[in-house]
Amino acid sequence: MRRRLNIAPGGVGRFRALALMGLTCAACAVVLGQADPVSAQAPGADAPASGIDREKPSGSTAADESQPNGSARELGVHLGLTSGGRVTAGGLRIGGSYLYQLSAVDWFEGSIDFVIGGTSADCFTDRTGELLCNHGALSGRSGEISAGIRRFLTPQGSFTPYARVRLGLRAVSFSGDDLRGLAAVVIAGIGVRARVHELVSIGGGAIVDAGAGIFGRDLGTEPQFSLAIQGGVEFLLK
């Protein structure tokens, strides 16, 4: 003879709650049993080494070690001598530069430069009435703004060589002849520098530029060509 199980209406709700709790506990046990032991460590605990070596980026080179860490900007000042001639200004060269790191070896380089030379009059008119100018290598004045790329090369001991290329716009003046002009130039150069302090580098280099300018007094278009040597100091910005 079968006996019928009588459950009070309130007992049905308690029975269902107990069953749900049992299923929940069983699911938690399965999840914990399959969990990665590393993920079960307490926060702040040292995770075991994965055994996988992390390689350096393929673009990194030996020059990386010579570059500053924690900043990507530098300011510099430089002083030198420019050799010009004809309608290219030459003389004392003074200027400043701004560097912004683009990659491990390439930096944006912006520069403003002034050349201060003699003021003698060296233009004359030939028999046909054509104006001719033949200024000396250290005559005239100019102001120039330029921008381009500086690439650092593999360090050689404590020194890091680099190459640079920039495009520039130059205003030229020869006050003795009341001659002025505006020129566009391509600038290329090489240099080397050494870091003497965490925030300071010193160095120097050579620059050559070539281009063309338009001048007043009916002189028209004339070539620009100069050579320069300079040295300076560059400061890392924090």
Image (spheres, grey):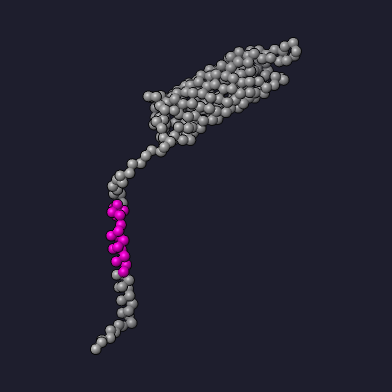
Residue 215: image location, x then y, percent: 68, 22
How far across and down, in percent of the image, does residue 77 sit? Answer: 49, 25
Q: Which residue sits at x=51%, y=30%?
A: 149
- Give the residue displayed 39% in from the left and 24% down from the top: 156
Give the residue furthest to the right.
128
Residue 48, percent from left and from top:
28, 47
Which quadrant of the figure contains the N terminus?
Answer: bottom left
Figure quadrant of the C terminus: top left
The boundaries of the magenta stretch are 23-42
Whether residue 118 appears in this view of the structure is no
Is residue 189 magenta-colored? Answer: no
In the depicted view, which residue is nearer to us: 210 or 8?
A: 210
Q: Residue furthest top?
A: 127
Give the main secondary structure of the magenta stretch.
helix
The residue closer to the viewer here, 74 or 220, is 220
The reply to whether residue 136 is in sight is yes
Q: Which residue is painted at 29% across and 48% down in the image? A: 47
Check residue 29 for magenta coloring.
yes
